[in-house]
Amino acid sequence: MAECKGTMTRRNLYLSAALALGLLAVLPAPSRAAQAASTGPSSGPPSGLDRNRELQACAAKAEANPDGAKADAMRWQEQGGGDFAKLCYALAQFHAGEFKAAGTQMEALVPTLGKDDPRAAASLLGRAGWAWLRAGDQGRAERLYSAALDKTPGDVDLLIDRAFARAEGERFWDAITDLDAALARDPRRADAYLYRATAQKALSNYRQALADIDHALELKPGDPEAILLRGNVKALGGNLPAARDDWSLARRVSPDSEWGRAAADNLARTAEVAGGKGKDAGKDTAKPKSP
């Protein structure tokens, strides 16, 4: 049975241009002295405002052209861009797939860009955690998320991210604990319900998983990821006809998405069983190849 990208599919936007702007909002502003020191001829170091603009431009470019963003970051650093230029380079490394290097650089910037500002430190730690998770180091990612939560206790996004990291390490009960805490703080997070349903599915708690999927669909009707997951849970519970109904719906709702394609694959894989090969065969075929 087709799933999408691992045990849980985190729609994490930490390294997008939009979220890089969010990072700017919590990074400490350059002091007046620093701005004065950087004011002068156009060939001199950029002002604080210019640094913000440079980082915004870099974040946008890093997604589309990471190599070009790297080159820009190196030039910027030569011109006195300092830690902002290093962050620019780390963003470009992430989008180039150099996750370990990106995570290492972001961690290294916490003592300076996050100095005396817990929100800025937590933001950088969270982004470093996502980079390490993409690098396959679930343990280091979890430690960074925990460090970020020490800076900003109860942050809903960080709780969800740590839950994702814990689930990647197959610590599903710990993931559920984080998701319970996130939903207690913000009960309208459809994504948290969906991630908790995925953890419940992994623990074979199908009734609880379906209840969470229903909550997610109340908050976000027609979400193809939720519909696909509901079909998968129903199949694992032995109700293949109902599962195929959900897969058909997911395919209709979003045929070109990864979830619509996974649903179509599930329909194809179970077509013979649905055609009448027997109940026992149906239960076996409905099991996922890699839960």
Image: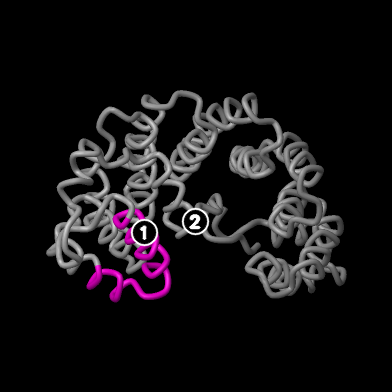
| Front-lying residue, 8 or 242 | 8
Rendering colour mode: one colour
Q: Earlier in the sequence, mark 2 or mark 1?
A: 2
User: What residue appears at the point 36 percent right and 59 percent down from the top-left corner?
Assistant: 53
Residue range in magenta is: 50-72
Q: Quadrant of residue 214?
A: top right
**Label 2 environment density (alpha carbons within 10 Å; few <14, some 14–19, many ≥20):** few
**Is residue 33 rendered to the left or right of residue 118?**
left
Could you say whether the residue bearing mark 1 is in a helix, strand or loop?
helix
Dominant SS in magenta? helix
Q: How many marks?
A: 2
| Front-lying residue, 185 or 110 | 110
Where residue 188 sits in the image (x, y, percent)?
Answer: 71, 36
| Front-lying residue, 176 or 243 | 176
Residue identified by numbered label 1: 53
| Front-lying residue, 153 or 55 | 55
**In this view, 170 is above or below 230:** above
Q: Are marks 2 and 1 in contact (CB under 8 Å)?
A: no
User: What residue appears at the point 66 percent right and 39 percent down from the top-left corner?
Assistant: 189
Q: Amino acid at mark 1?
A: Arg
Q: Which numbered tag is attached to residue 75?
A: none
Where residue 78 sits in the image (x, y, percent)?
Answer: 12, 64
**Is residue 289 rendered to the left or right of residue 213?**
left
Residue identified by numbered label 2: 18
**Label 1 environment density (alpha carbons within 10 Å; few <14, some 14–19, many ≥20):** some
**Residue 230 magenta-drawn?**
no
**Residue 68 magenta-drawn?**
yes
Q: Amino acid at mark 2?
A: Ala
